[in-house]
Image: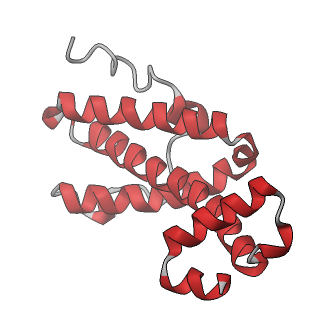
């Protein structure tokens, strides 16, 4: 029944699984689906980190390549993404070794964002991430970003 519930009413299944765990009714757990869902939660954290890095890197590139079109919105987006990335890493310290890989994946997403939102041609953009981890996470990078619209 529990495995069938997983397929027909996922929300109810999660409530039941949580109750079984809390009550110590381990024999009632849907172990195979539960293991799959727990693994999925970890993958979601990695995906969240990659996506936020993509938005951040895309906005850093737009900031760098279109200085005349800079907006407060870009500035706020950069700040927000940095804060969210720092929070993800603080809440999931084991993602730290994955950061370099996530930056490379995020760079690809960032390039796509630039291509969608600007007239910049792909041939005019870098083929590899030009920012270091430190720069990506530094709220004062690039110089003056925090005071551009004050």
Question: In front here: 76 or 11?
Answer: 11
Q: Is residue 100 above or below residue 11?
A: above
State left or right for residue 149 relative to residue 114.
left
Count of labels shown? 0
User: Where residue 61 sits: x, y (%)?
Assistant: 34, 45
> 146 left or right of 106?
left
**Residue positioned 73% across, 40% down in the render:** 93
**Position in image of residue 106 (x %, y %):** 49, 56
The correct choice, above or below, for 76 with respect to 41 in the image is above
Q: Horizontally, is 30 left or right of 44 in the view?
A: right
Residue 71, percent from left and from top: 17, 31
- Quarter of the view holding residue 17: bottom right
The residue depicted at 60 percent of the width and 57 percent of the height is 46
78 horizontally vs 9: left or right: left
| 3 to 138, vertically: above or below | below
Q: Which residue shows up at 53% across the image and 69% down it?
A: 12
Q: Quadrant of residue 121?
A: bottom left
Quadrant into which the N terminus falls: bottom right
In the picture, the quarter occupied by the C terminus is top left
Examine the rendered structure and indicate whether residue 1 appears above or below residue 88: below
């Amino acid at each position: 029944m529990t495995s069938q519930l997983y397929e027909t009413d996922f929300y109810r299944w999660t409530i039941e699984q949580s109750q079984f765990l809390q009550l110590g009714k381990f024999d009632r757990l849907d172990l195979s689906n539960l293991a799959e869902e727990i693994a999925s939660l970890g993958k979601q954290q990695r995906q969240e980190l990659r996506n936020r890095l993509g938005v951040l890197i895309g906005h850093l590139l737009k900031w760098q390549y279109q200085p005349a079109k800079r907006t407060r919105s870009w500035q706020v987006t950069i700040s927000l993404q940095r804060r969210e990335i720092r929070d993800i890493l603080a809440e999931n310290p084991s993602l730290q070794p994955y950061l370099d890989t996530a930056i490379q994946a995020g760079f690809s997403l960032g390039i796509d964002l630039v291509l969608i939102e600007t007239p910049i041609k792909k041939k005019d953009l870098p083929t590899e991430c030009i920012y270091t981890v430190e720069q990506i996470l530094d709220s004062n990078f690039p110089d003056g970003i925090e005071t551009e619209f004050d």
